[in-house]
Image (cartoon, helix red, strand yellow):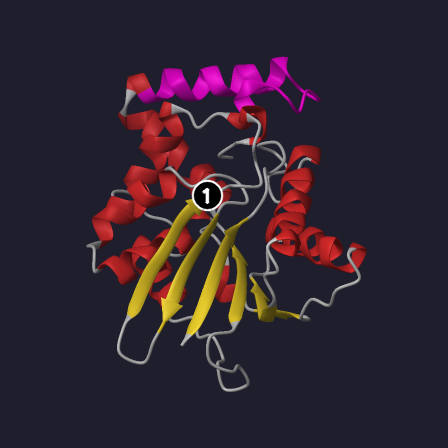
């Protein structure tokens, strides 16, 4: 059996440049690496999706190990761990929703007005807060209410669930790191809990940036040991969800 640490990426950039870590996101990731070092956590393998924010998080954690004179495994890339493409979904579905829902259209226009007003201000709430219109677009995608050229919700779940962690070179009770995002972590957590897919968005919604979730993989079962842990983020201002 192996302990798999699912690490959500650090705080991301702005809405227009979401797939990169903010300065705070890099700090969160480095603090996580320093915490793992302080606890004597050693990793036999490390995986990451293909997204910049996931790999940048892994690089900061690995940097903390290097600073301590310790080794960290070479990262194994696997785009199966990528988050769903919300930017692409929003770009395609939101205009269609504006035609059908006047309330949504007003919310959508308010967000765009805020983006224009806060151009260049990376700390603005419009970049950091999940809005009602965001939730409505995601719900529409999950329910398949509008045509979309990318992955469906079901295809996304199947893609993440199909990811395989090569344990052939891993001795029993060793640790594996997976640097991914909120919803892939929630998908595997739901599987461990034998929860239905409708619980996945609820699990993902509470995951903090650089939180780690530990699942123990056994031949006969997958057990949840730790969920959404952030002992490395002691100060409230370090805890974010975007």
Asked if 134 appears above or below 167 in the picture, the reply is above
Residue furthest to the bottom: 168
Image location (x, y in percent) of residue 152: 34, 55
Q: Which residue is mark 1?
A: 86
Residue 136 image-quadrant placement: top left
Q: Which range is magenta?
A: 104-126
Q: Is residue 121 magenta?
A: yes
Q: Residue at x 60, y 19 (%)?
A: 124
Residue 206 image-quadrant placement: top left
Q: Residue at x 36, y 24 (%)?
A: 132
Residue 177 image-quadrant placement: bottom right
Asked if 120 appears above or below 210 in the picture, the reply is above
Residue 20 seen by the camera? no
Front residue of 195 and 211: 211
Q: Residue at x 35, y 35 (%)?
A: 137
Front residue of 193 and 79: 193
Image location (x, y in percent) of residue 123: 64, 21
Query: What element does badge 1 sit on?
Result: helix
Label 1 neighbourhood size at 10 Å, few (<14), some (14-19), many (20+)? Answer: few
Residue 151 seen by the camera? yes
User: Looking at the rendering, in which quadrant would you find the N terminus?
Assistant: bottom left
Q: Is residue 17 left or right of residue 163?
A: right
Image location (x, y in percent) of residue 27: 68, 39
Q: Is residue 28 magenta?
A: no
Q: Residue at x 53, y 31 (%)?
A: 239
């Amino acid at each position: 059996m192996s302990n798999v640490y699912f690490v959500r990426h650090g705080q991301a950039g702005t809405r227009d440049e979401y797939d990169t870590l903010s300065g705070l996101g890099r700090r969160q990731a480095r603090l996580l690496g320093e915490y793992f070092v302080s606890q004597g956590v050693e990793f036999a393998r490390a995986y990451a999706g293909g997204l910049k924010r996931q790999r940048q998080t892994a690089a900061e954690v690995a940097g903390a190990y290097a600073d301590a004179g310790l080794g960290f495994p070479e990262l194994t890339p696997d785009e199966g761990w990528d988050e769903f493409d919300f930017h692409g979904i929003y770009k395609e579905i939101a205009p269609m929703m504006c035609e059908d829902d006047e309330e949504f259209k007003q919310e959508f226009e308010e967000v765009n007005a805020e983006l224009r007003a806060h151009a260049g201000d990376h700390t603005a709430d419009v970049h950091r807060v999940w809005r009602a219109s965001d939730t409505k677009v995601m719900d529409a995608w999950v329910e398949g209410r509008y045509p979309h050229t990318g992955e469906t919700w079901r295809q996304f779940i199947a893609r993440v669930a199909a990811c395989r962690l090569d344990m052939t070179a891993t001795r029993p009770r060793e640790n594996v790191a997976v640097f991914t995002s909120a919803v892939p972590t929630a998908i595997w957590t739901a599987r461990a809990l034998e929860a239905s897919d409708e619980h996945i968005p609820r699990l993902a919604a509470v995951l903090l940036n650089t939180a780690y979730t530990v699942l123990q993989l056994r031949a006969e079962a997958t057990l949840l040991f730790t969920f959404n842990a952030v002992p490395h983020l002691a100060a409230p201002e370090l805890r974010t969800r975007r």
